[in-house]
Image: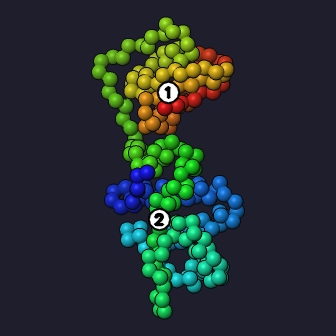
Amino acid sequence: MVSLKPVGRSASVIKYDLLTAMGAYALARDKHEQRLILRFMTLVVARYNWGRDELCVGQVEIARMWDVDTRTVKREMAKLRAMGWLVVRRQGARGRVTEYGLDLDRIKETTRDRWEAVGPDYALRMEGVEVPDKVVPLQVKGSLPPPDLSAGTEWALAQGVLHAEDAASYGSWLRALERVERAGGRLTLRAPTRFHAAYVQTHLWPRVVAACQSVDDTVSDVVLVV
């Protein structure tokens, strides 16, 4: 797994992505874990230094922030250390608070199964694949001829519809999709790469589904695989 560090030009995006991962993970857990992670996220947003990987704040201040007593703070911080999300960098002593860091790789590993729930483009970013916010369709030299409809399948006919609607998007993104199988009302298509699939699902998928259903009203579901 690629290790993402919140530094450089994309630092703010990485920070939001990590916080999103924590939040999505928490929402799939029980109320006790949800409260623990909400407290952790609040502490991170308020007091964590992303550039130096440093969380240096006293228990009294944390207790005030969380609206709890210091015994609860000790218990919750111990849970976070046990999860591996919080790491002791320097143990506190008289007149000095404990200094913590975050194990970002552990946080990513723990929350990994919730990435796809946020979206395929988000999951790719968390894997370290750069997904531009705006992708300009590839330019197809010359005029793109209409697709071959001779196969007569629902996908062949849908390709004709998609080409007529927007030849540029069809040539850059949709022409590369291949028909895999039809099982009842479900049509399965395949994209050449994960990035290609993520872009189509994020930006073009409603048009693909609509085109398939417009040529064959028995199509109830369209699935994209890689």
Mark 2 or mark 1: name the one nearer the start of the chain.
2
> Label 2 belongs to which residue?
103
| Residue 3 vertical placement versus 172 (above, below) | below
Q: Count residues near mark 1 (Cα–Cα under 10 Å), then give few for <14, some for 14-19, many for 20+.
A: some
In the displayed orientation, state which residue is furthest to the left: 141
- 199 with respect to 21 (left or right): left
The amino acid at mark 1 is Arg
Residue for point 48% across, 22% down: 178
Residue for point 48% across, 85% down: 92
Q: 77 or 51, which is in the foreground?
A: 77
Residue for point 43% across, 51% down: 1
Q: 11 or 226, which is in the foreground?
A: 226
Residue 132, image x and y in percent?
A: 39, 43
Image quadrant assignment for residue 43:
bottom right
- 73 with respect to 200 (left or right): right
Residue 14, image x and y in percent?
A: 43, 56
Residue 60, image x and y in percent?
A: 57, 84
Q: Which mark is residue 190?
A: 1
Residue 33 seen in render: yes
